[in-house]
Structure formats: C-alpha cells, structure tokens
Amino acid sequence: MAPRDNPLNEPQPGLPARAARPSEAELRDAVRILIAGIGDDPAREGLVDTPDRVVRAYGEWFVGYRIDPAEVLRAGRRRVAGSAELVVLRNVPLTSHCDHHIAPILGTVDLAYAPGPYLAEPEDLCRAVDAVARRMQSQETMTVQIARAVEQAIEARGVAVIVAAQHLCMTTRGVQQTGAVTVTTQLLGAFRDDSMARQEVLALLRRR
Ligand SMILES: [Zn+2]
C-alpha cells in the first residue's frame, strides 16, 4: 500500500479521547471479578492485595494517556543552523499493550530524521516513544504516532520509524507463533516523497 493511501496518515490528535474514568475502588472490584472468572479465590491470602497492585501497574503501563509526546520533544528541542543531514537512533526499547487483548507488545524502535530548524535530545526521543507506547493500540497506530510527533514537534524535513515487536497475545496463546516479530514502518516528509532519500534512510536503519 502506498504511504499516501494509508488511512492512518489522517490527522490524529496527540492524545486519544479520555473516557469517563471509574474510581479506584471500582477498578479493584473489576480485577476481583477477573480473578473469580479465572476460577481462583480473590479472598485467598496471595490474592488479597493483587487488585491494588494490578491497578497501580496499569497506571504505569498506560501513563502515556497523560503525556503528549510532541510536547515532550518541543520542550527540549534545540534550534540549530546547519546540522547533520540525518540523525539516527536505534534500539529504543518499547513496551506497549495491544488493544485487542491488553497483552504486552515488546520490541524496539529504530528512528531517523532529517533535521529542519531543530534537533531533539536523544533522551527526549526515547521519552516520546515511551509516551506513545504506554497506551493500548495497534502497532501500526503506534508507528504512525511516533513519526508524527517527531515531524510536528521539531519540524523535521523527513522522519522514518521502524517498529519491530513481539505480540504476547500471538506468542503465548492461539497459534503460539513463538518468536514471531511484526515489523511496521512509517515514512514522512522527504523520506516518503524522495525515493533516493527513502532508500538511503532504510539502508541505514537496516544496517546492524
Ligand atoms: Zn493482541
């Protein structure tokens, strides 16, 4: 599919709409119901405090709903004159959850951009990736959102993002494709429009 035909290229807000949120007590009750549904006893000793721990863990896994990745990058960007042609950041760790099963997606992000007027701090790029990842979503959406945040926040001339990840919903259940890795790519700006620039950046990102 040509990148222009990808429906995920449609503008999306930086943050997903926030639904009405239940109280923590209601969340703990929901976890107790899940435990009972599994067939275990939520009142037994080892499980008494589990609902509280699960609710707190969800708070960490999904903290991205409260962070705008573009804002993270904008806050730390540096204006430059005559910077490098290409900035590459490889092997940024990624922890996310799929919106089909709320199961972990574990992988890495390789990212490159052709700077416009600004450079991003490498740690800010990692934080922006983490902010996008710590939501429930598909890998394709995540890839697009990372690329868009970089493009918008530092006005990069081109952005390339490659996400390679294992979906635990796939590797631990159903067809059990242990080790199967899904790779998604998003190219924006010069890397999308200029075939030479595209080949150059993809060759660079593939090199190990
Ligand atoms: Zn899934």
Image (tube, helix red, strand yellow):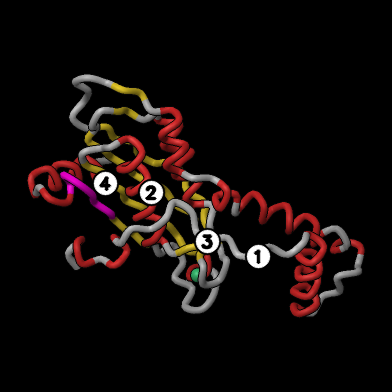
Left or right of 134: which side holds 111?
left
Q: Nearer the viewer, residue 58 or 76?
A: 76
Q: Which-is-in-front pick, marks 3 and 4? A: 3
Task: Estimate the spatial distance between the alpha carbons at disc 1 and disc 3, rounded to whole Å.
Answer: 10 Å
Q: Residue at x 44, y 51 (%)?
A: 14
At label 2, counting other C-alpha atoms closer than 10 Å, the crowd grade (few under 14, some 14-19, many 20 or more) is: many
Q: Position of residue 106 (x, y in %)?
A: 49, 54
Residue, disc 4 = 160
Determine if the C-beta at disc 4 is less than 8 A from ligand 1: no
Q: Amino acid at mark 2?
A: Ile
Disc 4 residue type (three-letter): Ala
Q: Cα distance, mark 2 to mark 4? A: 9 Å
Give the residue at mark 3. Answer: 17
Question: Magenta span has 30?
Answer: no
Circle 2 is placed at which residue position? 146
For label 1, the crowd category at 10 Å Cα-Cα, with few meaning under 14, some 14 to 19 and many 20 or more, is few
Quadrant in which the N terminus is drawn = bottom left
**85 over 132 or under it: above or below:** above
> Helix, strand, or loop for circle 4?
strand
Q: CA distance from mark 2 to mark 3?
A: 17 Å
Residue at image point 44% right, 33% down: 124
What residue range appears in magenta? 186-191
Which quadrant does the C terminus fall into? top left
Residues at discs 3 and 4 in contact (Cβ within 8 Å): no
